Image (cartoon, coloured by chain):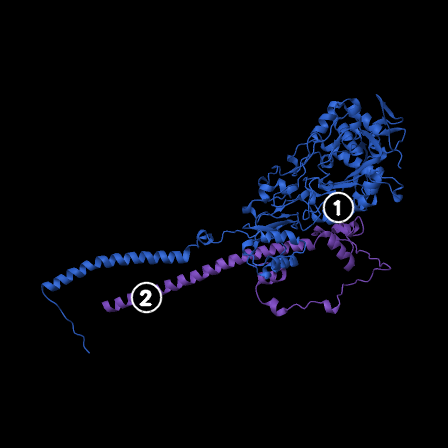
Chain colours: A purple, B blue
């Protein structure tokens, strides 16, 4: 009897010791991974900051205006294109609403379709085209590998 | 196999029995102890949360780029940010071949002087800087050179991605990232606080509006060959500045000369005589005090002689004018007579309440005091009534006009976005949450009348060029002669327009000013407020109106139209 009990306890002690050891090992590995990850998050955040600055630089209103003039057949919205609720689009007065309108537009909505007059010149929407030689070949294989930060730093040349 | 039971008998058996009995006690104790442990283990494993405090010890958020906090516009577009920009330094003792090294450095950084770099490489010092703030590409190339003597020191650089846009509001920082002007300086406690590195500063500026104002002003400035220009767009209900431009302007990223003319923020730094814009306050104070009714007639038949001076009208009608006509046709004589009826003391008290005697209120440094008359006699009171003899900054005028049209509350201008969820104390802002909390300076009734008068001035008066289809724009033009060597100059003028839209429920005040515009052919060689500044404001309104979601209206009848006898 006592042998069975004793061997049972010995077995339990061994199992629990093994479990504790492996748990500790896993925790340490996770801990290391976590520090690694948080370091990488900080690096990524710094990289995102660079990208955000770049995006702000590229989306300067003046630059966008020039690009839109060149490439888009759109013009700035006019006041007559805007409506704030359904009654102003109705086009007639003295009408009764069947029910209380649901459409209280929080944002101004287009009212009329903007008329776009074709100018004699400058109607062609031209896209910039580079000569074949100058087109850069992006190495896909290289870009696909690596994580987010590596790809960015590869593009920007940020030092590690 | 049979088990054999062995028995020990006699005194020995009794001793073993006693030992066994005694063993039960420690066994019981051990079992108790272990069961406590097991119960606690299970309860921790199942029911208790992982304590965050222990986990976070290793990951205190220390950003890599953290020296200064970002500045964003009201929609979240980046206006100022910090980027990593390492500095190149050298340890001369680790350089073996200075000549070869310098050639390679020059290949990467061609703007450097070869001789200076060579001297640095050969110097006997331990550590020398070669160049600050390298770009990522340059950093990569320097690293690729692989010299152990070249060192890249981590550093940060303040970058303004929007370039010249809003440079006067943002200000700039010097080489050591110390703020020197603008919001950068005013909010330095927040911006330089590393703990708040993830808490960007939201300005009230709207980048799109700012761009439109700057573009239109620049266009007008070139068109009329003006020396300078300034413009403001302000929300009348909250005091938020949506755009503030002063031309010429500078680029915070480039080299900066603190005393150059482009560093001046004309909106707060330079007091100007505002001209007819001031008649708004004169008429408002007269209506408020009750000495004048709208239908009163004022004698503007002949120029007014006061002491040695004669007051003329620029657009003389040479007849009796009603109060709306005085305002609409911008009669200096009429305004002077109204001021005389109001009285000097009331006028002074009124202008003081509107903040015209103090520095303008805004979160910027370098605000200047208005220039007031030395002695406030009858003639001074009269000239002040039409905006001469008193010089205020454009921001004074805009804040005052906002108070006149918004129902009579003086709301100080602010550059910080006002949110319902914003905790205003952390920005050092006044804690008023609602417009009704601000001090009343004009009665609501007078404010309502003034809206109509301002609309009339655009409909029938000099501000006609500011009319915009779909929006009811109101406003007042102003043309003031500049004082050159103590004398009013005939040719050098300050022309301005201060407008409000939409007039039935004012939302925004627009201010546009041109310094010394020259007349051109299209304007019949005139460069007055109506010809030069009003169209700028009109253009700005027509572009920002749909963008800011201002509801366009079909024309609503303006009141007091019948009081205008002759329509131009």
Q: For mark 2, what is the residue?
A: A14
What quarter of the picture does the C terminus of chain B occupy? top right
The quadrant where residue B430 appears: top right
- Report the residue that reaches farthest toward the top: B307
Q: For mark 1, what is the residue?
A: B214
Secondary structure of the residue carrying numbered label 1: helix
Disc nearest the viewer among 2 and 1? 1
- Pointers 2 and 1 within a single chain: no
Left-right relation of B51 to B192? left
**Chain letter for the residue marked with disc 1 in the picture:** B
> Can you give x and y, in whole percent of width and height, for residue B491 in the image?
85, 35
**Chain letter for the residue marked with disc 2 in the picture:** A
What is the distance, in whole Å, between disc 2 and disc 1 at their CAs?
A: 78 Å
Q: Specify whether residue B466 is in view.
A: no
> Can you give x and y, in whole percent of width and height, for residue A5 in the image?
26, 67
> Can you give x and y, in whole percent of width and height, for residue A60 in the image?
71, 52
Left-right relation of B11 to B540? left
Say which mark, if any, is on residue B460. Answer: none
Q: How many marks?
A: 2
Q: Specify whether residue A115 is in view.
A: yes
Left-right relation of B190 to A59? left
């Amino acid at each position: 009897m006592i042998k069975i009990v004793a061997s049972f306890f010995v077995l339990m002690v061994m199992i629990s010791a093994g479990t504790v050891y492996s748990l500790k090992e896993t925790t340490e590995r996770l801990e290391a991974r976590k520090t690694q990850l948080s370091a990488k998050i900080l690096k990524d955040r710094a990289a995102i900051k660079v990208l955000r600055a770049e995006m702000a630089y590229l989306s300067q209103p003046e630059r966008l205006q020039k690009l839109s003039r060149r490439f888009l057949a759109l013009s700035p919205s006019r006041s007559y294109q805007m409506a704030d609720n359904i009654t102003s689009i109705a086009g007639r007065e003295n009408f009764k609403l069947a029910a209380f309108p649901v459409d209280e537009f929080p944002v101004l909505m287009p009212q009329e379709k903007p008329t776009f007059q074709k100018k004699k010149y400058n109607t062609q929407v031209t896209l910039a085209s580079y000569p074949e030689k100058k087109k850069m070949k992006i190495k896909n294989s290289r870009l696909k590998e690596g994580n987010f930060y590596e790809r960015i730093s590869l593009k920007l040349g940020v030092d590690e | 196999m049979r088990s054999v039971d062995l028995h020990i008998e006699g005194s020995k058996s009794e001793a073993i029995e006693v030992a066994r009995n005694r063993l039960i006690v420690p066994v019981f104790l051990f079992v108790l102890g272990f069961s406590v442990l097991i119960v606690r283990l299970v309860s921790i494993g199942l029911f208790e949360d992982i304590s965050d405090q222990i986990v976070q010890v290793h990951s205190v958020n220390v950003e890599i780029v953290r020296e200064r906090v970002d500045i964003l516009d009201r929609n979240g577009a980046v206006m100022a940010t910090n980027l990593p920009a390492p500095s190149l330094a050298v340890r001369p003792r680790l350089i073996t071949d200075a000549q070869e090294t310098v050639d390679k450095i020059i290949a990467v950084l061609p703007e450097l002087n070869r001789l200076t770099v060579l001297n640095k490489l050969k110097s006997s010092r331990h550590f020398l800087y070669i160049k600050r703030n390298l770009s990522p590409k340059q950093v990569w190339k320097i690293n690729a050179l692989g010299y152990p003597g070249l060192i890249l020191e981590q550093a940060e650089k303040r970058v303004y991605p929007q370039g010249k846009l809003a440079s006067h509001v943002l200000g700039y920082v010097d080489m050591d990232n110390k703020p020197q002007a603008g919001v950068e300086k005013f909010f330095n406690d927040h911006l330089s606080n590393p703990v708040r590195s993830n808490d960007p500063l939201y300005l009230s500026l709207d980048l799109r509006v700012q761009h439109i104002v700057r573009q239109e002003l620049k266009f007008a400035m070139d068109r009329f060959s003006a020396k300078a220009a300034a413009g403001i767009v302000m929300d009348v209900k909250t005091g938020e500045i949506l755009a503030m431009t002063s031309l010429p302007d500078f680029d915070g990223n480039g080299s900066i000369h603190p005393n150059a003319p482009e560093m001046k923020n004309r909106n707060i730094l330079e007091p100007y005589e505002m001209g007819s814009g001031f008649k708004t306050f004169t008429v408002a104070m007269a209506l408020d005090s009750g000495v004048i009714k709208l239908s009163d007639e004022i004698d503007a038949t002949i120029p007014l002689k006061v002491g040695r001076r004669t007051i003329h009208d620029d657009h003389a009608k040479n007849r009796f004018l009603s109060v709306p006509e005085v305002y609409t046709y911008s009669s200096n004589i009429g305004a002077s007579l109204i001021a005389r009826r109001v009285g000097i003391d009331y006028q002074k008290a009124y202008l003081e309440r509107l903040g015209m005697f103090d520095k303008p209120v805004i979160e910027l440094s370098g605000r200047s005091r208005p220039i007031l008359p030395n002695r406030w006699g009858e003639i001074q009171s009269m000239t002040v009534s039409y905006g001469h003899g008193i010089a205020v900054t454009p921001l004074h005028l805009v804040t005052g006009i906002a108070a006149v049209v918004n129902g009579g509350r003086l709301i100080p201008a602010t550059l910080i976005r006002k949110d319902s969820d914003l905790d205003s104390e952390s920005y050092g802002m006044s804690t008023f949450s609602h417009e009704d909390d601000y001090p009343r300076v004009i009665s609501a009734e007078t404010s309502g009348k003034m809206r109509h008068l301002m609309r009339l001035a655009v409909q029938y008066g000099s501000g006609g060029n500011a009319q915009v289809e779909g929006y009811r724009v109101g406003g007042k033009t102003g043309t003031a002669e500049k004082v050159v060597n103590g004398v009013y100059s005939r040719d050098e003028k300050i022309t301005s327009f201060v407008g409000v839209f939409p007039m039935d429920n004012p939302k925004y005040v627009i201010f546009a000013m041109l310094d010394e515009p020259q007349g051109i052919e299209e304007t019949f060689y005139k460069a007055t407020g109506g010809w030069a500044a009003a169209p700028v404001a009109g253009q700005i309104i027509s572009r920002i109106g749909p963008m800011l979601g201002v509801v366009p209206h079909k024309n609503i009848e303006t009141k007091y139209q019948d009081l205008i006898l002759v329509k131009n």
